[in-house]
Image (tube, rainbow, N blue to C red):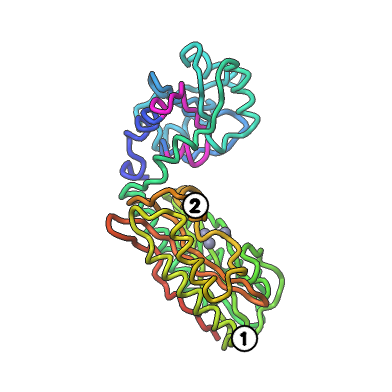
């Protein structure tokens, strides 16, 4: 991917953050943290691949010799950092330990490092205290660069194109699974490299926020929650929920949908720099509670999004963290009274003076025939 999205200086920023946090080194195995730091979308394997960023010293990337060509071809190969290949009979953990300053105090491990690897590092660095790297990396990953915002916009546009195709796919007489399979194909077709999730919650299944598509046949007059997302070639993720109905929806559904629509609008309107994340949650919750549907809004209002579908910041009561320009997160209140439910979800970017939505399809009930 472009060096703009994964800039060369980012490993240096990780090192600065590590030093500021009093860490001796940051150890990043394959996953979103490694990709963020280097652009390298490395496979998770039992053989150790690890970016080692000493707070004081040169970073290096340890790779199994079999993976060396892939590492060289990846953006990590162009960063000017040393690639250290290890052979089948080498001990890569001892190799890392031997290259770190003696008596390294605290090491931060990628949040998604496999436990077996964390334990091997513990044995190889017996004097070092292990902490999660997320505590340091969150400060960097939470504030998206202009190139990251652009990548999220492209992901939003791609998932919007999928939502625009849903009316052709969602028909009375088809099962949720049939519709979900077609939507999954459309997610790839519209430019994603992988499908993260496809929720097609028809009728009573719409009242379950995380419903898996079933063999249930969708019938006329039933509201359907469609919540979909995937990962783009850039590494950045999409996530958007819209609500469909095969024919005319029930009157009580229209009633609470109007409340939800207003709640989601109010939450979006609350987004600007300096506002606490929890106040965006409250903006949605107050509207829903004020209309007596509070008990049916059973989840937080949103989650951050970037290289992971769910990352910081979380838009939830108790998170007093003030929003800053570049933060990206979902605004997705829901009301689930049964025998159906609804959720409206957009990905917003906090801007200098307000916010921008990366999703632009109509938020009203989409009637399909
Ligand atoms: Zn969810
Ligand atoms: Zn979401
Ligand atoms: Zn979603």
Q: Residues within 10 Å of mark 1 (few under 14, many from 20)?
A: some
Q: What x and y, as percent, mark residue 155?
A: 42, 58
Eye-nearest disc, 2 or 1:
2
Q: Is mark 1 within 8 Å of ligand 3?
A: no
Position of residue 132 relative to residue 174, above or below, is above
Q: Nearer the viewer, residue 168 or 25?
A: 25
Position of 334 with respect to 211 (left or right) is left
Res 20 seen here? yes
Circle 1 is placed at which residue position? 221
Q: Position of residue 357 (x, y in %)?
A: 37, 63
Query: What is the distance, in whole Å, between disc 2 and disc 1 at their CAs?
Result: 35 Å
Secondary structure under tag 2 reads strand
Residue farthest toward the left in the current orientation of the protein:
353
Numbered badge on residue 314? 2
Q: Residues within 10 Å of mark 2 (few under 14, many from 20)?
A: many
Q: Quadrant of the rendered structure where residue 351 is?
A: bottom left
Residue shown at 63% from the left, 23% from the top: 120
Disc 2 and disc 1 in contact, CB within 8 angstroms: no
């Amino acid at each position: 991917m472009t060096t703009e999205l994964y800039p060369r200086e980012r490993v240096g920023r990780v090192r600065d953050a590590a030093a500021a946090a009093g860490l001796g080194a940051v150890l990043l195995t394959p996953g979103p943290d490694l990709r963020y730091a280097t652009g390298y979308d490395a496979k998770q394997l039992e053989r150790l691949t690890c970016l080692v960023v000493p707070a004081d010293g040169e970073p290096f990337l340890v790779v199994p010799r079999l993976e060396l060509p892939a590492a060289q071809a990846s953006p990590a190969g162009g960063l000017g950092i040393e690639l250290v290949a290890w052979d089948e009979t080498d001990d890569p953990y001892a190799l890392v330990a031997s290259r770190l300053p003696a008596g390294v105090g605290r090491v931060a491990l990628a949040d998604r490092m496999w436990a077996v690897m964390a334990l091997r590092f513990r044995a190889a660095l017996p004097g070092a205290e292990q902490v999660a790297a997320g505590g340091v990396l969150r400060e960097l990953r939470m504030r998206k660069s202009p190139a990251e915002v652009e990548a999220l916009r492209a992901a939003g546009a791609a998932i919007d194109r999928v939502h625009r195709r849903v009316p052709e796919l969602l028909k009375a007489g088809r099962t949720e699974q049939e519709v979900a399979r077609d939507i999954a194909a459309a997610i790839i077709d519209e430019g994603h490299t992988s499908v993260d999730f496809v929720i097609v919650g028809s009728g009573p299944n719409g009242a379950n926020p995380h419903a898996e598509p079933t063999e249930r046949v969708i019938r006329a007059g039933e509201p359907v929650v469609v919540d979909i997302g995937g990962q783009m070639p850039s590494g950045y993720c999409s996530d958007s929920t819209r609500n469909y109905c095969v024919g005319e929806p029930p009157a009580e559904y229209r009633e609470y949908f109007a409340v939800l629509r207003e709640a989601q609008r109010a939450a979006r309107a609350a987004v600007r720099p300096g506002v606490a994340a929890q106040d965006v949650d409250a903006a949605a919750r107050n509207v829903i509670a004020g209309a007596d549907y509070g008990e049916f809004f059973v989840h937080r209002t949103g989650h951050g999004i970037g290289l992971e579908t769910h990352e910081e910041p979380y838009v939830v009561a108790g998170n007093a963290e003030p929003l800053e320009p570049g933060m990206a997160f979902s605004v997705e209140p829901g009301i689930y009274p049964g025998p159906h439910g609804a959720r409206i979800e957009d990905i917003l970017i906090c801007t200098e003076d307000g916010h921008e939505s990366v999703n632009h399809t109509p938020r009203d009930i989409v009637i399909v025939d």
